[in-house]
Image (tube, rainbow, N blue to C red):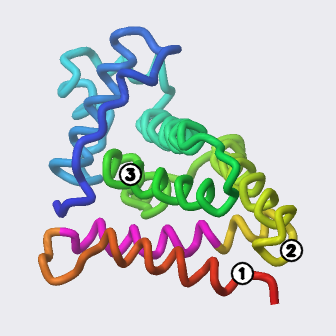
Amino acid sequence: MGPASSVTSVSATTTELDEVGVALVEAAATLLATEGPQALTVRRIAAEAGVSTMNVYSRFGSKDGVVEHLYVRGFELLAASQREAGVTGDPILDWKRTAQAYRRFALDHATMYGVMFERSVPDFEPSPEAVRAGLATLDHLARRLERAMDAGVMRRMEPLHAAALVWATCHGVMSLELRHRISDTLDWAQVFDDACDALMRGLAPQ
């Protein structure tokens, strides 16, 4: 597996799960990172966690229930990282800090990022509720961008549309970086910054 398969620790965020539930989610993340999606079976997840398969069924219903937990938790962590970026008196700075929070999340939680955005588990389809929970993270970004519009440093458009443009740009760079970051021929941090700056210039008032 490549760099995008690094193990993501989820124990700090799975507060509604008991110890066995946390162990199962950690086991799934480890298997996905080290062996790929073909290793994600109920039997393997349970064995990795050191429990019986019944524990998977009783807590998550199926293998997909475990993967969905990774999916939703990933978006929760992403939203938390964007909130932690803080708010200043400069809406452009706030937007850049939010974008950097996205990049840090992708690098620090690459396994979750793969589940969320890269279909790293090809047969997994998130439930409509999980998809809605994920898309809710756009609201935070949209509010940041609306502040920039109100300040006159970004042209007026529907805030969620603007958020989708930003998200697409950030995601495009991060998808490439996570696949190729072992290469020493590109400064991916600079590529990310330059892409964000180019987007903001394109969205400046005409």
Specify the label residue 203 is tagged with. Answer: 1
Quadrant in the picture for the C terminus? bottom right
Q: Amino acid at mark 1?
A: Leu
Is any part of residue 127 visible from this angle?
yes
Q: Residue at x 43, y 33 (%)?
A: 66
Disc 1 vs disc 2: which is toward the camera? 1
Quadrant in the picture for the N terminus? bottom left
Task: Bin the neighbour count of mark 2 within 10 Å (Cα to Cα): few under 14, some 14-19, many 20 and up.
Answer: few
Residue 179 located left or right of residue 193: left
Q: Indicate the quadrant where residue 43 lies.
A: top left
State how far apart marks 1 and 2 are (Cα): 9 Å
The residue segment tinted magenta is 166-181
Give how far across and how far down residue 62 sits, in percent: 46, 33
Q: Amino acid at mark 3?
A: Arg
Which residue is the site of mark 3? 104
From the viewer's side, name the closer residue of 87 and 38: 87
Residues marked 1 and 2 touching at CB (< 8 Å): yes
Which residue is the site of mark 2? 157
Q: Choose the circle earlier in sequence order: 1 or 2.
A: 2
